[in-house]
Structure formats: C-alpha cells, structure tokens
Amino acid sequence: MNKIIEPLVNVDLETGKLSGKEVIEVLKKLNDLKNVFGAEEVRAGMDQEQVIYEVQAHLPIAEGTLAGLFYGTTIIYPGKVGDEYFMTKGHFHAQSDRAEYYWGIEGEGMLLLMDKDRNTWAEKMYKGSLHYIPADVAHRTVNTGDSRFILGACWPSDAGHNYEEIMQNGFSARLVEKEGNPVLVSEQEVGL
Ligand code: S6P
Ligand code: ZN
C-alpha cells in the first residue's frame, strides 16, 4: 500500500524498442510469408531465412481478455519481392469490430486498409503520423523506404487476429514500386 514502484516495461521513444518484463518477440522470415506476395515464385527463390519484420509486444493480460489493451512495436526491413515492397501479413481482428491505433516511429511506410466490401486504400506513415484503424477494417503495413520502417500499435486485448481471410483472399490492392515511387495497384490491374 502507498508504495512507489518502477515501471515493468520501458519504451525507447526513438526506436520504439520495448524492454522489460512481459514483452514477447516474434520474427517473420520470408519462409513464414508463403503466398503473401503477388510474385510467389520470386519469394520462393529468395533467401528464406531473411527476416522481413519483427514484432515486440507488451501483453500484460491473457489474449482474449475483455476490456484490456495491448501495446506493440513492429519493425519492417526494407526490400521487395519483385516490385512489391516488404510488408506484414495483415489481418482483420477476430472480433472484427475492434479498432486499433497505429503511429509512425521511424522511416517511411504505408498503412494498407481494406473494409469488408474489399475497398482498399493506403495512408502514408512517417515519424509522428497517427492512424485510427476503424472496426471491421483489415490492416497491413508496408515499408516503402530504403531503411527500416518502425511503427507503434495499441489494440484491445480481446481483438485477436483473423489471418485466414487475408491468406485466402488477400487485399484487393498491392503496393508496388513504379519508376521509383509507391503505387497502389488494384487486383483487376494485376490479376490478383
Ligand atoms: C496487432 C497489430 C500489430 C501487428 C503487427 C504484425 O493487432 O495490428 O501488432 O500484429 O504489425 O502484423 P501481422 O499482420 O503479421 O499481425
Ligand atoms: Zn490489428
């Protein structure tokens, strides 16, 4: 009672890096991203051990618990599979009406968003940009720069992840490099 305690976790405000207790880390290598990129045959021919992104998260309560919050940092390394930028798998939330905040910490990227009617749009992300991901909107982040892209996230502890929908049907548009610039190309245009 009436005691002053040290925080369990620290966040480096320059890099988003979390340190301390109850921090989990997940690495996603090219080998974990089968059929995520449009050019699967190009991905299959690349170094499967290459780390594409990593996630650190502070999960102070069990996943699925109602009314709590989780906090995470995602680092996406620069690069492309064919002309498509390195990106996260992307997901709807399992409880699909749960929203989320993202913000940019370092580098340049885009937040790809898709609603239930498969309308896809992208928001530019950079150090200090803030993004509200509404309910029922799938989200994926993309590194469009030539250095690492880091973002922060905060989401409800009962949101969960529905990766299946995106693994089966993808987003309806992809971010590809054309003449040195990121361009959002719809599935009709590339025959996804
Ligand atoms: C969780 C939040 C992020 C992502 C992370 C990796 O709801 O949106 O922490 O998990 O950016 O993306 P993904 O699609 O592989 O989970
Ligand atoms: Zn999410």
Image: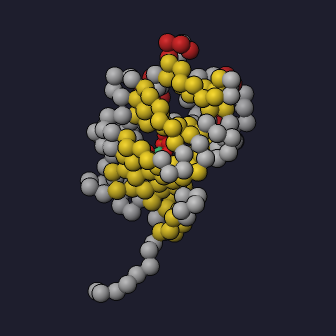
Residue 40: horizontal and vertical position, in percent? Answer: 63, 24
Quadrant for the N terminus in the image: bottom left
Residue at point 39% right, 23% down?
A: 119
* Farthest bottom residue in view: 2
- Residue 181 placement, left or right of 111: right
Residue at point 37% right, 43% down?
A: 132
Residue at point 59% right, 42% down?
A: 108
Residue at point 50% right, 68% down?
A: 10
Location of residue 84 by image quarter:
top right
Q: Is residue 79 above or below residue 188?
A: below
Nearest the eye: 48 or 179: 179
- Residue 96 placement, left or right of 77: left
Nearest the eye: 18 or 14: 14
Residue 15: horizontal and vertical position, in percent? Answer: 58, 58
Q: Is residue 118 above or below residue 56?
A: above
Residue 124: horizontal and vertical position, in percent? Answer: 51, 38
